[in-house]
Image (spheres, rainbow, N blue to C red):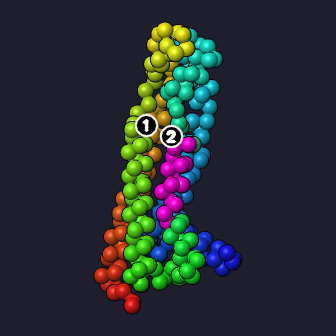
Amino acid sequence: MSLNYIKNFYEGCVKPPTVIGQFHTLFFGSIRIFFLGVLGFAVYGNEALHFICDPDKREVNLFCYNQFRPITPQVSFSALQLVIVLVPGALFHLYAACKSINQECILQKPIYTIIYILSVLLRISLAAIAFWLQIYLFGFQVKSLYLCDARSLGENMIIRCMVPEHFEKTIFLIAINTFTTITILLFVAEIFEIIFRRLYFPFRQ
């Protein structure tokens, strides 16, 4: 792959053919990455160290924490969700770069427009699935008390554990769910933008 292909691929990813796509990539996407990277680590960075159960034993704390948090919503799940949702667009722009398709031509020729719309629809589907998993795994609220089933450790009891900074984590979860909702709405709006532009600027054969 020549440097020209790499340049076209980079420009396609950074500057999509739609205004809404550019807004999502340059502005909203940057805010979301900053939110996950900076604020997310501040909230979830030392969660395991401050997760305390009664009795306060290291093995009990670790076991119950893994039960309480099999995957972190900030580092693991949200980052994976962000990458997966961006894959269809990246694949399209890779295809456009290999075919030497100019960004201005994407919305001018029917075949390119249809392929691009399909990539947006795939992004919507992936974002919706990720949103459902996000709600299923984490919900909208983090409670201050977690009841851990520690019978497999031989404790033969339900152990109470204190969740650190539960209020901040609740706010963070609400923010993540809000970001995901806005992302889906932006993808839907991008399709409407394409349709609107096609109504005023007919396809070039």
Task: Tell me, yes or no, if residue 35 can be seen here.
Answer: no
Q: Position of residue 154 (x, y in %)?
A: 54, 10
Task: Tell me, yes or no, if residue 139 can be seen here.
Answer: yes
Question: Where, quadrant-wise, is the C terminus in this rendering?
Answer: bottom left
Question: Where, quadrant-wise, is the N terminus in this rendering?
Answer: bottom right
In the rendered image, residue 140 lying in the magenta stretch gets the answer no
Q: Position of residue 100 (x, y in %)?
A: 57, 82
In the rendered image, residue 84 lying in the magenta stretch gets the answer yes
Mark 1 crowd level (few <14, some 14–19, many ≥20, 10 Å Cα): some
Please, what is the three-letter code of the amino acid marked with disc 1? Leu
> Is there a contact, CB below 8 Å, between mark 1 and mark 2?
yes
Vertical arrangement, residue 113 with respect to residue 64, above or below: below
Disc 1 secondary structure class: helix
Residue sitting at 41 percent across and 65 percent down?
A: 120
Residue range of the region highlighted in magenta in the rendering: 76-89
How much space separates mark 1 and mark 2, taking CA atoms?
9 Å
- Residue wearing tag 2: 73
Vertical arrangement, residue 161 with respect to residue 133, above or below: above
Residue farthest to the left, as pictured:
199
Between label 1 and label 2, give the one nearer the viewer. 1
Instruction: Pick the residue in front: 83 or 175.
Output: 83
Residue sitting at 48 percent across and 82 percent down?
A: 104
Instruction: Pick the residue in front: 21 or 88.
Output: 88
Residue sitting at 36 percent across and 59 percent down?
A: 185
Q: Which mark is residue 137?
A: 1
Instruction: Pick the residue in front: 161 or 89.
Output: 89
Disc 2 secondary structure class: helix
